[in-house]
Image (cartoon, grey):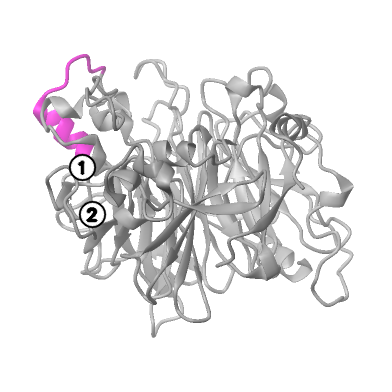
Amino acid sequence: MLPNRRKFLEILTKGTVSASLLPYAVSGCAAKKVNSKSVRGIAPSSDDALVLAEELDYNLLIQWGDPISEQDTFGFNNDFIAFVPDKQKTDEGTLWVNHEYINSLMIHQKAVTGKTKEQVEKEMYAVGGSLVRVKKENSQWSVVPHPDNKRITGLTEIPFNWGTPIEGKRTAMGTLGNCAGGVTPWGTVLTCEENYQHFYSDRSSSNRSITPSTEGWEKFYANPPEHYGWVVEVDPTTGAAQKHVALGRCSHECATVKELADGRLVVYTGDDKNDEHLYKFISSQPGSLREGTLYVANLDVGMWIPVDVNQQPLLMTQFKTQTEALVYLRESAKILGATRLDRPEDIEIDPVSGDVLVALTNNIPRENFFGSILKIEEENGDHAALTFKAATYLTGGEDTGFASPDNMVFDRAGNLWFTSDISGSKMNQPPYSAFRNNGLFLVMRDGPQAGEVIQMASAPVDAEFTGPCFSPDGSTLFLSVQHPGEQSSSLESLTSHWPGEPNSIPRSAVVTIQGALLNQIQQLG
């Protein structure tokens, strides 16, 4: 049985990992000979540079503002990356890249105190996502001209995949707050709308008033906040998109997909806000996310609770329809007694054990500064099970060398890679001083370094790494470098100039990381 909530938080904030929870110190895999060569990481850095471990190199693939077609340019603040391989060509494919949010100073290259409609539309174009064709030649990746290169933006009309209208409409204007995501078995991309409240504010089911949003887009486009906060499916060939109401509305960080033996889908997603919740959707039909049952996690009893007005009389005290219960998902979860968590962000399924890992970034109001990674073990390894066991996989802190875990990915050998998300306003300050800039970390599955957290890269000033994604052969790691120089107060006092020359405007970018060490790590794993 899990410890109580207070004890659980005490475990998370100590910054240590129990030997009994050491990840994969004992694996269910067959024993194998382990290479004794060790992996050497880097020390934390505060340099305005992308610092990598020895035997790793990076190349700039694409940056904010680069043209991707005759009419479109690459968006702002790139985040999640999905690689959709070409069916016939091994070294070619399409990248989907999220564009999460805007920075008015950088986008307009001047201080903005009162936005015009034209400025808001420029910001709306900057978010959403980019589809770009990439090709590997002479061992290096590049973006190439292709009819599939296109943008989905805050201005793109996107239908709701649902039987009834949302706030009187069957389509929404645009997608925004696009953080992490997932990929379906049929090759479409799931992109998740996270902090939608910055653009059109928010409201509860009982209080219908809308306060001014941070960005103020509602001054020119009176779009209801209920049109945002969804999981959006995008066809990487046509760019056609749809918003999946069945998966509920919240600050979705990701949508991690597992296909069941009968073809139905399980989708795990977290609500990236203090004291919010972990969800699991199980589709009712193979190959579709339109219908199914959404569940929310109660860690204290290890149970997935259905968010369904037909099964939960308590929900009927607040909501008249299932649509309302999904639109105001946070309220539904609390009515049902779901466990409040510490900003559940990315979720990945271990390819060997089947365990579900959840990055809990932090919960500063509860004095959990360093976060943790949670492990969910579904009953009998069945991802459709409604009961589970939960335990701490790793806790952040100076002892383990990381703080505020965020995006995760497994390599071909089952080693875990993850990034950190220390806020720019708190970076290099107590209690985060020892961690310096945000980083990229590795946890080896096997060998003498099994369970050890190794820092493999350090981000430029104010930046974080996001969206780690491996090429199909594992030889390249695609990685987003997001919001360098974000804490700059003016163009005359920029905190970062990455990736350009001194005095240049900082730009978010996607890089490709390659090198002998990358191949070595996957052999050691």
Taking depth in this image into account, of 379 and 309 the one nearest to the observer is 309
What residue is shown at x 21% (from left), y 64% (from top)? 240
Magenta-colored span = 111-125
308 relative to 102, above or below = below
Q: Amino acid at mark 1?
A: Tyr
Q: Is residue 64 visible?
A: no
Q: Going by the image, does 289 lie left or right of 40?
A: left
393 relative to 34, above or below = above
Taking depth in this image into account, of 285 and 308 the one nearest to the observer is 308
Are dots 1 and 2 in contact, CB under 8 Å? yes
Q: Going by the image, does 461 lie left or right of 502?
A: right
Residue 179's quadrant in the figure?
Answer: top left
403 relative to 169, above or below = above
The quadrant in which the C terminus is found is bottom right
What residue is shown at x 37% (from left), y 63% (from top)? 189
What residue is shown at x 24% (from left), y 31% (from top)? 200
Q: Which mark is residue 125?
A: 1
What residue is shown at x 15% (from left), y 52% (from top)? 171
Q: Amino acid at mark 2?
A: Arg
Q: Estimate the spatial distance between the alpha carbons at disc 1 and disc 2, rounded to whole Å.
A: 9 Å
Q: Which residue is mark 2?
A: 151
Residue 309 % position (x, y): 37, 51
Is 117 magenta? The answer is yes
Helix, strand or loop at disc 2? strand
Residue 440's quadrant in the figure?
Answer: top right
10 Å neighbourhood of mark 1: few (<14), some, or many (≥20)?
A: many
Is 390 magenta? The answer is no
Residue 80 % position (x, y): 44, 51
Residue 346 % position (x, y): 53, 49
Q: Is residue 397 visible?
A: yes
